Image (spheres, rainbow, N blue to C red):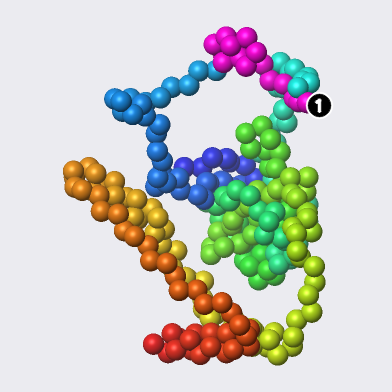
């Protein structure tokens, strides 16, 4: 695994040399290319001005910020370079938070963090263990690809996981979602729903994360390579019975969950 960033984690007077790695593997993702249907040649793209219809070269293009409809302020690359932040190669942890307080919606990209060099191992392990024991996460900042991001660092296994966080201005308010008005819940229904959740509870490592779409697609790819005829599978419609009484539905669901667990 090749690191994408090397530097230090620093909190108070403690400094730990680290390496940062991409946690997400993209090479197994299924990607399609756009082809000309007559000869299966790759499709290329031209940059064309919407106004004069001219085909543009890279040197003809500048960057503009739309501050009003069809009104732009234009920036040169030198102007943009002038405001780039210089990396200090240090993630300075300003504070620690309870990991359960962080809304899941704020997480963006995920990275793995490991010690850089033999001398870093002991202090790195100390940080990982104290985060694990306290269930805390460190909040700091890092400059990746010329942009400063707020990051959250927490323990996983023997290592650390670093999440790039979304800024508040990037997030919509969940209160804008319609029909979230509080509805009084019947205590008996709530108790049965809790029992149903408990009966369906399992450990995370037992969850089936098979990508069934990718599996079916790769089978189809192989069949096409082998020159076989593609046989489509017709999905049967689920028998959906309208819920008449939620109490009866909850009780029946609990019994069904118990049967599945005992099987």
Image coordinates for residue 176, horizontal then vertical, percent = 78, 55
**Residue at image location 52% in from the left, 77% down from the top:** 241
| Frontmost residue, 1 versus 216 | 216
Circle 1 sits on which residue?
68
Q: Is residue 231 left or right of residue 98?
A: left
Residue count near mark 1 (Cα–Cα under 10 Å), binned few <14, some 14–19, many ≥20: few
Image coordinates for residue 193, horizontal then vertical, percent = 64, 83
Q: Which portion, as a residue range, is magenta?
A: 48-69
| Frontmost residue, 239 versus 82 | 239
**Residue at image location 66% in from the left, 64% down from the top:** 131
| Frontmost residue, 103 versus 37 | 37
Is the residue 155 above or below the residue 5 in the image?
Answer: below
Q: Is residue 90 left or right of residue 175?
A: left
From where the camera sits, is residue 82 visible?
no
Q: Specify the quadrant of the image occupied by residue 39.
A: top left
Is the residue 183 above or below the residue 136 in the image?
Answer: below
Image coordinates for residue 107, horizontal then vertical, percent = 66, 53
| Frontmost residue, 75 versus 41 | 41
Q: Specify the quadrant of the image occupied by residue 77.
A: top right
Q: Specify the quadrant of the image occupied by residue 175.
A: bottom right
Determine if the magenta segment contains residue 262: no
* Screen quadrant of the C terminus: bottom left
Is the residue 251 above or below the residue 214 in the image?
Answer: below
Is the residue 20 above or below the residue 34 in the image?
Answer: below
Give the farthest residue toward the left: 227
**Residue at image location 34% in from the left, 50% down from the top:** 217
**Residue at image location 25% in from the left, 49% down from the top:** 230
Give the mark count.
1
Circle 1 SS class: strand
Determine if the magenta segment contains residue 49: yes
From where the camera sits, is residue 42 visible?
yes
Q: Is residue 103 left or right of residue 116?
A: right
């Amino acid at each position: 695994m090749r690191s994408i960033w090397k530097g230090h984690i620093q909190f108070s007077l403690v400094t730990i040399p680290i390496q940062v790695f991409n946690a997400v593997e993209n090479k197994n993702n299924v990607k399609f290319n756009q082809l000309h249907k007559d000869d299966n040649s790759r499709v290329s793209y031209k940059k064309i001005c919407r106004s004069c219809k001219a085909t543009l070269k890279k040197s003809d293009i500048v960057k503009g910020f739309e501050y009003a409809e069809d009104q732009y302020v234009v920036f040169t690359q030198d102007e943009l370079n002038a405001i780039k932040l210089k990396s200090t190669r240090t993630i300075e942890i300003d504070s620690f938070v309870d990991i359960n307080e962080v809304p899941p919606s704020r997480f963006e990209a995920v990275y793995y963090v490991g010690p850089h060099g033999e001398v870093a191992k002991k202090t790195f392990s100390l940080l990982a263990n104290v985060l694990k024991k306290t269930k805390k996460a460190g909040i700091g900042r890092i400059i990746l690809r010329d942009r400063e991001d707020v990051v959250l660092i927490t323990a996983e296994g023997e290592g650390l996981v670093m999440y790039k966080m979304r800024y508040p201005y990037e997030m919509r308010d969940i209160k804008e979602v319609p029909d979230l008005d509080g509805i009084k819940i019947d205590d008996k229904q709530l108790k049965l729903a809790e029992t149903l959740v408990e009966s369906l509870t399992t450990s995370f490592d037992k969850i089936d994360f098979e990508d069934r779409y990718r599996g079916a697609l790769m089978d189809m790819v192989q069949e096409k390579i082998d020159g076989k005829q593609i046989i489509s599978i017709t999905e049967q419609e689920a028998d959906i019975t309208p819920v008449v009484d939620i109490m009866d539905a909850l009780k029946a669901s609990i019994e069904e969950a118990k049967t599945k667990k005992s099987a």
